Image: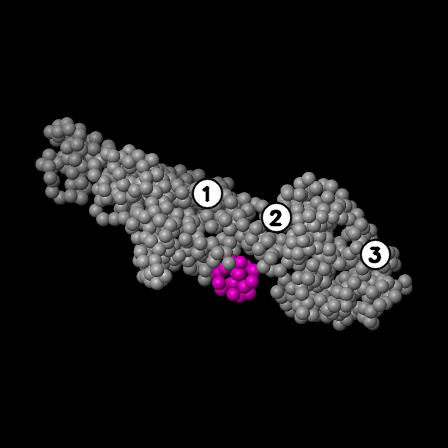
């Protein structure tokens, strides 16, 4: 019997536990004299028994699955066939691995004849430990289930206990996202550390020449100066995109909160929010196929002959348009959060609507707006599709918006696509870039959330 | 249904038409005739006619929801900011119809200032709070003049002594009572003719309230003042004329002492003696 069948069996037994637990509680209710003398509803007792039956068994099985391979290998090694194995760790390990996969049926023919001799002991040990695990798990189900079943009494607070289990489950679910993020961060750090053991962080962070193809030997590599990438990222994501997104986002937010008739606002706000959900690859097409050629033609027509068809401007403008909904929705929220007493105060002084907006509402909403802009920046610099499709690959350090620049995300894609050795500095550089991006966006988000929170407090 | 009739106090001379309610001697600063206000379908004010005199502090009293704030907001057209609100009838400031199509609302609000129930200083410095109105209306031609306006406004509002050393601090950092006086100073700074106050003391403690009342006494006569209050003693202390509203109608309007000692209407008597509600 394999693990899946066992799991299904355990869960089936749990359901059975639910039925008997519920039945017992129902009998108690029926037998009880007064209403409410049984603390919890029968359902809760059912769950109580089922959870007691299933959860310890599953916990045991997960632990067993982790420890049993080592036990199996140990057992197999005690067999007489193991004495013929070479002592050398690497060959020995590969023979054992081969024997294991043959025993599990993942592989049919052995590469090393010694492996074949080990298959037998492996199979024996595997089935031995599997049986132990299975029996123990089933025993656990019955023992714990029976324990819970015996505990069912009118005064058992099954409802409270289920409540606690529910809470723990929810907590666990919320931890998963955080733990995963931490895991990603740690793995980034590890890979980056390997990279920085080959390329000095100073060269990486402050070098101005980016040409990772020039890597020759394992030491003293050059061409890993990431400054042009950082510049390209900032130029596109934080400068050009924001020049587009901040005024347009802010103005649309002002219009929507202050001028638009309620019905129009009720339509426009969801539409703007839907825009935020358009896949970025669509914007990428738009940037690469429509905006970039148009901008190039325009540049050439006004006499900029070296204009590239993959321009920073095209990527930045389209990214800015993509970001507008973020800026406008954050700005909208912050302007709407300014107490109307403030607006009325200004209007009652004889200020016009636009004076009120300019002199009272925007200054009061500014922290929230700034927070929104920071969030938008952090999104823009992490954005990949648009720049991959429209920004180009040349690591230029230029402030000419019509020339081609490249960004951190574009280069990460470049470094990781195609056949790569997994421990060459070229591949590892992608992790170092990822780490920098991760840290910068994390900091931006932290600052932004802080600013927004402070601002919220100011009006509570 | 217009149940307001010409209610005349013996000592007063009526200066309006049949349905008007006089405010006292001389020509009134503001007159309202047959004002009705609707919020959508719902009528909030029903045929209110009242005269407001320059020399008086006029108090509006009445149970909650009777339309005092609504009526007050008609006088500087703040109801315009509520999209569903509709105002009919005649409201004149110095014989000029303030709801006329060519009325400049911005100018009107500079002439008819307002102080709100909850102090609402702008999140700017104390100085900038006061300078806000003079700046948008271009009342000062230079820094010196603006400084002067700020100082005199704060002095009139009795706040100068407390804040003269901290004019750059945020207005929101003041205490509630100081904030409310700041708002009064802010209203005074544009040199209005009328000041409307909607329960200006309801968020303040008794000491801060006393300061505001004292302030009202001091500025009385320079501005026509209308104050909405739930506090009967306050109405009696600060006002010379009192109007009693009930369910959107004006029940009685007259000399404050008469209203409080000798009301002509049953409802007024019930309300001021606390028998109402
Ligand atoms: N913005 C609005 N939209 C719709 N109805 C409103 C609005 N403002 C006030 N009303 C209604 O108009 C009526 C009068 O309200 P108003 O605020 O003028 O009363 P009030 O006398 O000032 O009461 P209070 O003493 O509680 O301040 C109430 O029935 C109220 O529900
Ligand atoms: Mg009110």
Q: Quadrant of the N terminus of chain A?
A: top left
Do pointers 1 and 3 mark residues of a single chain?
no
Image location of residue B97, percent across then percent down: 73, 69
**Spatial separation of the CA atoms under disc 1 and disc 3:** 58 Å
The percent position of residue B60, horizontal first and vertical second, equals 77, 58
Residue pointed to by mark 2: B123
Mark 3 secondary-structure assignment: loop
**Quadrant position of residue B24:** bottom right
Q: Is mark 1 within 8 Å of ligand 1?
A: no
Identity of the residue drawn at 65% across and 54% down: B135
Q: Which residue is mark 3?
A: B240
Q: Residues within 10 Å of mark 3 (few under 14, many from 20)?
A: some
Q: Which residue is tagged 1? A: A446
Q: Is mark 2 within 8 Å of ligand 2?
A: no
| SS class, disc 2 | loop
Q: Is residue B106 magenta?
A: no
Task: Write the start and end of the magenta stretch as one range.
Answer: A252-270
Q: Nearer the viewer, mark 1 or mark 2?
A: 2
């Amino acid at each position: 019997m394999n693990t899946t069948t066992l799991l299904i069996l355990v869960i089936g037994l749990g359901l059975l536990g639910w039925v008997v637990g519920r039945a017992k509680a129902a009998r108690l209710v029926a037998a009880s004299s007064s209403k409410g003398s049984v603390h919890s509803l029968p359902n809760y007792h059912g769950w109580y028994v089922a959870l007691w039956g299933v959860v310890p068994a599953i916990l045991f099985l997960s632990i067993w699955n982790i420890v049993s391979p080592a036990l199996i290998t140990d057992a197999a090694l005690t067999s007489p066939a193991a004495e013929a194995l070479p002592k050398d760790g690497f060959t020995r390990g590969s023979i054992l691995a081969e024997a294991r996969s043959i025993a599990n049926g993942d592989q049919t023919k052995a590469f090393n004849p010694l492996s074949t001799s080990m298959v037998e002991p492996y199979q024996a040990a595997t089935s031995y430990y599997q049986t132990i695990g299975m029996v123990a798990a089933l025993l656990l189900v019955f023992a714990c289930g029976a324990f819970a079943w015996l505990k069912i009494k009118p005064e058992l607070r099954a409802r409270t206990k289920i409540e606690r289990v529910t809470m723990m489950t929810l907590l666990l679910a919320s931890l998963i996202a955080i733990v995963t993020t931490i895991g990603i961060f740690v793995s980034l750090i590890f890979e980056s550390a390997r990279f920085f053991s080959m390329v000095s962080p100073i060269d990486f962070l402050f070098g101005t020449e980016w040409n990772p193809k020039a890597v020759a030997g394992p030491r003293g590599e050059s061409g890993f100066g990431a400054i042009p990438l950082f510049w390209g990222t900032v130029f596109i994501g934080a400068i050009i995109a924001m020049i587009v997104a901040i005024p347009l986002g802010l103005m649309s937010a002002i219009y929507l909160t202050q001028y638009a008739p309620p019905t129009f606002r009720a339509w426009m706000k969801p539409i703007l929010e839907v825009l935020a959900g358009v896949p970025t690859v669509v914007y990428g097409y738009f940037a690469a196929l429509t905006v970039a050629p148009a901008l190039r033609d325009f540049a050439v027509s006004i006499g900029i002959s070296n204009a590239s068809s993959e321009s920073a401007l095209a990527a930045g403008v389209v990214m800015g348009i993509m970001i507008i909904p973020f800026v406008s929705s954050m700005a909208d929220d912050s302007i709407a959060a300014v107490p109307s007493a403030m607006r009325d105060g200004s209007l009652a002084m004889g200020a016009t609507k636009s004076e009120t907006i300019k002199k009272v509402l925007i200054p009061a909403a500014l922290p929230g707006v700034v927070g929104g802009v920071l969030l938008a920046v952090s999104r823009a610099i992490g954005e990949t599709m648009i720049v991959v499709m429209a920004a180009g690959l040349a690591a230029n350090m230029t402030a000419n918006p019509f020339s081609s620049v490249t960004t951190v995300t574009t280069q990460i894609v470049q470094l990781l696509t195609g056949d790569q050795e997994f421990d060459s500095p070229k591949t590892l550089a992608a992790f170092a870039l990822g780490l920098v991006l991760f840290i910068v966006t994390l900091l931006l988000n932290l600052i932004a959330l802080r600013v927004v929170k402070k601002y919220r407090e100011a009006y509570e | 249904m217009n149940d307001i009739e010409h209610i005349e106090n013996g000592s007063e001379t009526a200066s309006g038409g049949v349905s008007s309610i006089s405010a006292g001697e001389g020509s009134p600063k503001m007159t309202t005739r047959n004002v009705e206000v609707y919020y959508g379908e719902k009528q909030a004010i029903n045929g209110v006619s009242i005269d407001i005199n320059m020399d008086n502090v006029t108090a509006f009293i009445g149970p909650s929801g009777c339309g005092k704030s609504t009526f007050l907001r008609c006088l500087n057209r703040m109801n315009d900011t509520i999209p569903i609100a509709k105002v009919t009838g005649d409201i004149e400031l110095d014989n000029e119809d303030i709801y006329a199509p060519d009325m400049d609302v911005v100018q009107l609000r500079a002439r008819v200032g307002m102080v709100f129930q909850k102090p609402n200083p702008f999140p700017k410095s104390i100085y900038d709070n006061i300078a806000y109105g003079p700046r948008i209306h271009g009342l000062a031609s230079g820094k010196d003049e603006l400084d002067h306006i700020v100082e005199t406004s704060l002095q009139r509002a009795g706040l100068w002594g407390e804040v003269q050393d901290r004019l750059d601090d945020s207005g929101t950092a003041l205490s509630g009572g100081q904030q409310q006086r700041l708002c009064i100073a802010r209203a005074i700074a544009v040199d209005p003719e009328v000041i409307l106050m909607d329960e200006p003391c309801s968020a303040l403690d008794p000491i801060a309230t006393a300061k505001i009342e004292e302030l009202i006494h001091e500025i009385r006569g320079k501005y026509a003042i209308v104050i909405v209050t739930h506090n009967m003693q306050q109405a009696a202390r600060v006002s010379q004329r009192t109007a009693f509203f009930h369910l959107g109608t004006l029940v009685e309007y007259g000399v404050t002492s008469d209203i409080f000692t000798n009301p002509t209407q049953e409802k007024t008597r019930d309300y001021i003696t606390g028998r109402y509600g």
